[in-house]
Image (spheres, grey):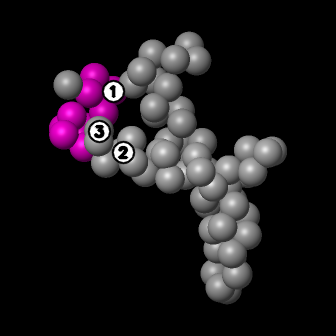
Amino acid sequence: GLEAGWLDASYKAHADKMRQAVHSMLDKDGLLQGSSAASWFNSPGTSPEAQAFFLMMEGTYNRLNKQGS
């Protein structure tokens, strides 16, 4: 099971697909491109919310896979 999480292990395949999709949108500096940001959320670019999602996702992935400790 997922020791660090509250979701069933059956979600792992979906999470891996989401992670692959996000990684395909990273630029050379590690910024997530193509997400809309405030104030109108109508123009693709970079967004603090998307970057925070990426960092939390990677932190959780690393914790679950015992990497980066």
- Give left or right: position of 67 versus 18: right
- Tell me the kind of residue under disc 2: Ala
Nearer-the-camera pick, 2 or 18:
18
| 1 or 3: tag closer to the N-terminus | 1
Which structural element holds mark 3? helix
- Tell me the kind of residue under disc 3: Lys
Q: Residue at x 33, y 26 (%)?
A: 4
Q: Look at the image and tell me in which quarter the N terminus lies.
A: top left
61 shown above or below 20? above
How far is the residue under mark 1 from the one under mark 2?
14 Å
35 shown above or below 27? below
Which structural element holds mark 2? helix
How far is the residue under mark 1 from the one under mark 3?
13 Å
Indicate whether residue 9 is drawn in magenta.
Answer: yes
Q: Which residue is mark 1?
A: 4
Q: Which residue is mark 3?
A: 12
x then y, percent, for residue 35: 63, 68
67 shown above or below 10? above
Q: Quadrant of residue 38?
A: bottom right
| 1 or 2: tag closer to the N-terminus | 1
x then y, percent, for residue 17: 39, 48
Q: Look at the image and tell me in which quarter the C terminus lies.
A: top right
How far is the residue under mark 2 from the one under mark 3?
5 Å
Q: Which residue is mark 2?
A: 15
42 shown above or below 67? below
Which structural element holds mark 1? loop
Nearer to us of marks 1 and 3 is 3
Query: Bounds of the magenta span?
Result: 2-11
x then y, percent, for residue 30: 74, 44
